[in-house]
Image (spheres, rainbow, N blue to C red):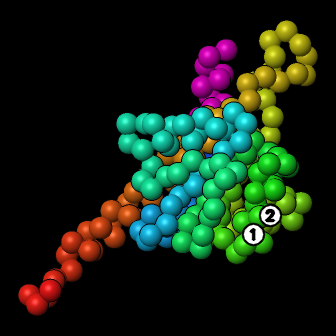
Amino acid sequence: MSKILTTQMSGLLQRIQTSEEEAVEETARLLAQAGIGQGHVYFACFGELKAVELNAVTSVAPFAKIVPWTDDVVVTEVDRVIIFARSCQDPEALALAQKLYDAFIPFAAVASEVASADNPLSELAYTYISLKVRGGILPHPTKLGERIVFPHLIAALFIYEAIKMAYDEMISDDEELEEDTPTSPFS
């Protein structure tokens, strides 16, 4: 079973990489607007995807300018938000998305479903990335037709790392430009 799991997981990550590459870049660029400027990058993660936020905050290389989302947070126009939810129908994620949309705060969203007119989260978000997880990825060994292993978190962490790589490159390029800018001797 582990070989089948490895094959299925590799296929999932490959599908994400090939179909969501542009959305990952756009999302990193969106978040870098706050990372380069005076803003913060808020991670609003729901359900089991709260582990993405935990990783972003406490990992060996934390996400620069991250602030965990809470209901008490006041987001301004210089801030950016990324929402991670298993489903585009998650009520908490949708409520936050609508609030940000109404306040004209650009935000990114990550959820299982593909972007479409029937996906309310993708319709509200400035950038949207699909986890490409439609259900279980392995057949249950004893029950016919039932599927097991729902890799939402693994897919979300993969997407997080892809965004972080692009984001780190963007904000480090900005820091290098600032360092290379000549200063006036009269300053």
Instruction: Between residue 92 and residue 4, name the one nearer to us.
Output: 92
Q: Is residue 86 left or right of residue 69?
A: right
Q: Magenta segment: does it hold 179?
A: no
What's the residue at 81%, 34% (across, down)? Answer: 135
Does residue 5 belong to the magenta stretch?
yes
- Residue 32 visible (yes or no): no
Instruction: Residue at the far top: name it.
Output: 142
> Residue 121 falls in which quadrant of the image?
bottom right
Report if the CB atoms under discs 1 and 2 are less than 8 Å apart.
yes
The amino acid type of the residue labelled 2 equals Gln
**Furthest residue in direction bottom, as rendered:** 186
- Where residue 139 appears, as percent x and y from the top left, is 80, 21
Q: Is residue 186 above or below residue 119?
A: below
Cα distance between the residues tagged 1 and 2: 5 Å
Residue 98, labelled with which disc?
A: 2
| Element assignment for label 1 | helix
Q: Residues within 10 Å of mark 2 (few under 14, many from 20)?
A: some
Measured as percent of width and height from the top left, residue 53 is found at: 57, 42
Which of 65/85 is in front? 65
Residue 184 image position (x, y, % from top left): 13, 88
Residue at x-position 38% and y-position 64%:
171
- Label at residue 101: 1
Region rendered in magenta: 1-11
